[in-house]
Amino acid sequence: MPARDVLQYPDPRLKTPALPVADFDETVAALIADMLHTLDASPGVALAAPQIGANLRVIVVDVRRDAKEERRVGHGLVVLVNPVLLAAEEEHTIREGCLSVPDFTANIRRYRRVLVQGLDRNGQVQVLESEGYEAIAFQHELDHLDGLLFLDRVASVKSDLFPRRRR
Ligand SMILES: [Zn+2]
């Protein structure tokens, strides 16, 4: 299974709400495999299925991929199908980026702690308590499933949106 191209803003598929996964068939298994390969080949820590053009509610998160050690705390590799946010607390402002919006970062309001529920790749229910960087990744990827980008959460384009320096 190859790594796939990550769709770039303003691709309309990034703005389309994704559909729940109904069956854990080979199509979903292949999608998850492609997402993991794509994540591996990327500089990011998380990916949502719509970012590779699949209109299904699947996310993969692995904060161990981050360059900063203090951000690597969490559950390791997480695959969540049909994820939902059960609870969230303590809003704060953090700087955020996205593989689909490579030219910008922005200050965004997010919750510091979240409780997320979803199905693992075998269809088993898992509930994850998460905080810090991983909690932000979950919120960011859940947004992708609803057709939202971090750009949609920027309060002030003038003061909170920043061009990213190209490496
Ligand atoms: Zn993103």
Image: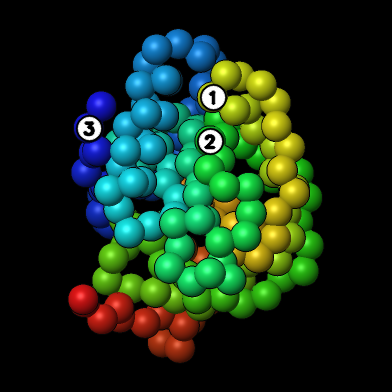
Q: Is mark 1 on a helix, strand or loop?
A: loop
Callout 1 touching callout 2 (CB < 8 Å): yes
- Work out which quarter of the rendered image holds the N terminus and state it: top left
Q: What element carries label 3?
A: loop
Q: Can residue 149 be seen in this view?
A: no
Specify the amino acid type for callout 2. Answer: Val
User: Crowding at label 1, few (<14), some or many (≥20) Cα neighbours within 10 Å?
Assistant: some
Q: Which is nearer the N-term, disc 1 or disc 3?
A: 3
x, y (%) of residue 53?
Answer: 30, 36
Front residue of 3/100: it is 3
Q: Left or right of 36: which side holds 8?
A: left
User: Crowding at label 2, few (<14), some or many (≥20) Cα neighbours within 10 Å?
Assistant: many
Calculate the distance from the C-alpha at mark 1 to the C-alpha at mark 3: 19 Å
**Measured along the vertical axis of the image, is residue 13 above or below residue 33?**
below
Q: How many marks?
A: 3
Q: Left or right of 14: which side holds 138?
A: right
Q: Which is nearer the N-term, disc 1 or disc 2?
A: 2
Specify the amino acid type for callout 3. Answer: Pro
Q: Mark 1 points at which residue?
A: 121
- Which residue is pictured at 45% across the width and 88% down the height? 159
**Measured along the vertical axis of the image, is residue 113 above or below residue 79?**
below
- Which residue is pictured at 58% across the width and 71% down the height? 70
- Which residue is pictured at 52% across the width and 12% down the height? 23
Q: What element carries label 2?
A: strand
Front residue of 80/72: it is 72
Specify the amino acid type for callout 1. Answer: Arg
Calculate the distance from the C-alpha at mark 1 to the C-alpha at mark 2: 6 Å
Q: Mark 2 points at which residue?
A: 79
Q: Name the residue under label 3.
A: 2
